[in-house]
Amino acid sequence: MESSSERLLTPGEVAALFRVDPKTVTRWAAAGRISSIRTPGGHRRFRESEVHALLRGEDVLTAERPAGESPRV
């Protein structure tokens, strides 16, 4: 069950943490390298806990990936 108190970050906020362009973050999401949530207006948002796990070098998508599905690179 997802916590409703989890902070969601914009592509710009994630980009600042990784020191990349926001478009790069959007491409990562489209490629499946990071999961995102879509707002009712269609904007991407990223879970703060997942972003910080990625910053620590953890592969957070493997736990969420269905069995037998290979990671996208």
Image (cartoon, rainbow, N blue to C red):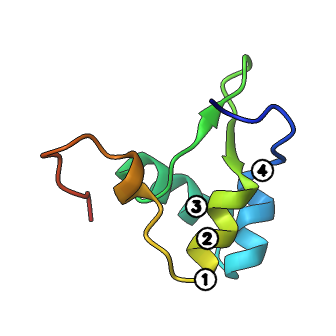
Residue 5 image position (x, y, % from top left): 87, 38
Relative to 11, residue 45 above or below: above
What is the C-alpha distance between the residues marked 2 and 3?
15 Å
- Is residue 25 or residue 37 the one in the foreground? 37
Judging by the rendered image, the residue that carries numbered circle 2 is: 53
Relative to 70, residue 6 above or below: above
SS at mark 2?
helix
- Give the image quarter of residue 62: bottom left
| Mark nearer the N terminus (3 vs 1) | 3
SS at mark 3?
helix
Q: Amino acid at mark 2?
A: Ala
What is the C-alpha distance between the residues marked 4 and 2?
16 Å
What is the C-alpha distance between the residues marked 3 and 1?
17 Å
User: Would residue 68 be found to the left or right of residue 44 on screen?
Assistant: left
Q: Nearer the viewer, mark 4 or mark 1?
A: 1
Q: Nearer the viewer, mark 3 or mark 1?
A: 1
| Mark nearer the N terminus (4 vs 1) | 4
Judging by the rendered image, the residue that carries numbered circle 1 is: 56
Q: Amino acid at mark 4?
A: Thr
In contact (CB < 8 Å): disc 4 and disc 2: no
Q: Within 10 Å of the Cα at label 3, are there few (<14), some (14-19), or many (20+) other Cα atoms? A: many
| Mark nearer the N terminus (2 vs 3) | 3
Q: Amino acid at mark 3?
A: Val
In contact (CB < 8 Å): disc 1 and disc 2: yes
Residue furthest to the front: 1
What is the C-alpha distance between the residues marked 4 and 1?
19 Å
Judging by the rendered image, the residue that carries numbered circle 3 is: 25
Q: Nearer the viewer, mark 4 or mark 2?
A: 2
Residue furthest to the top: 40
- Is residue 58 or residue 71 the one in the foreground? 58
Mark count: 4
What is the C-alpha distance between the residues marked 1 and 2?
5 Å
